[in-house]
Image: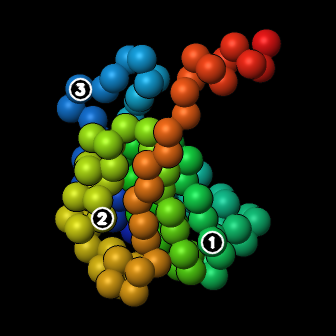
Amino acid sequence: MRLRELESALSGVKTFSQPKVELEQYPTSAHLAARMLHVAQGSFGDLEDRCVADMGCGGGILAIGACLLGASYVVGFDVDADALEIAASNAHEEEVTPCTELGLLHWCSYAVDYWTLRSTSS
């Protein structure tokens, strides 16, 4: 898929309507996501037929883009259940049906106690 096609395909991905500051949520634009994914695939061959984990997936734009570029299995992780709901909705809206119907795209919640992690790492 060409860069412009990927950016166009990702342009409909919705982001947070009210980002949670404490979770440092910020949207990744279709422009930036398409370029990151295009470099990962075009320069390094890191997506097609690969397993991809999108850590802190938010609205799922990178996970959805990885599916569009031929990743064999994609999991989007986030601590925020609202973000995972947005990601699942985006996957449905963006019609990455082959990934979802074949069980190749999943959304998972992970619980990390930020304050415990921070206090043990210092």
The amino acid at mark 2 is: Ala
Residue 64 horizontal/vertical position (percent): 41, 63
**Mark found first going from the N terminus, 1 or 2:** 1
Residue sitting nearer the eye, 27 or 92 = 92
Q: Which residue is label 2 attached to?
A: 91
State the image quarter where residue 58 is shown: top left
| Residue occupying image coordinates x 26% and y 74% | 95
- Give the left or right position of residue 41, taking residue 23 as reference: right
> What amino acid is at disc 1?
Cys
Between 23 and 114, the one nearer to me in the picture: 114
The mark found on residue 99 in the picture is none
Residue 13 appears in the rendering: no
Q: Secondary structure at mark 2?
A: helix
Q: Confirm or deny contact between disc 2 and disc 3 (CB under 8 A).
A: no
Mark 1–mark 2 Cα distance, whole angstroms, equals 17 Å
Residue that appears at 33% across and 49% down: 84
Q: Residues within 10 Å of mark 3 (few under 14, many from 20)?
A: few
Name the residue: 23% across, 68% down: 92
| Up/down of 32 relative to 17, above or below | below
Residue under label 1: 51
Q: Residue at x 63, y 82 (%)?
A: 49
Image position of 71 with respect to 8: above or below:
below
Q: Report whether 95 appears left or right of 118.
A: left
Residue 108 visible? The answer is: yes
Q: Which residue is mark 3?
A: 18
Q: Kindly identify the amino acid type of the residue bearing the numbered disc 3.
A: Gln
Label 2 crowd (10 A; few <14 / some 14-19 / many >=20) = many
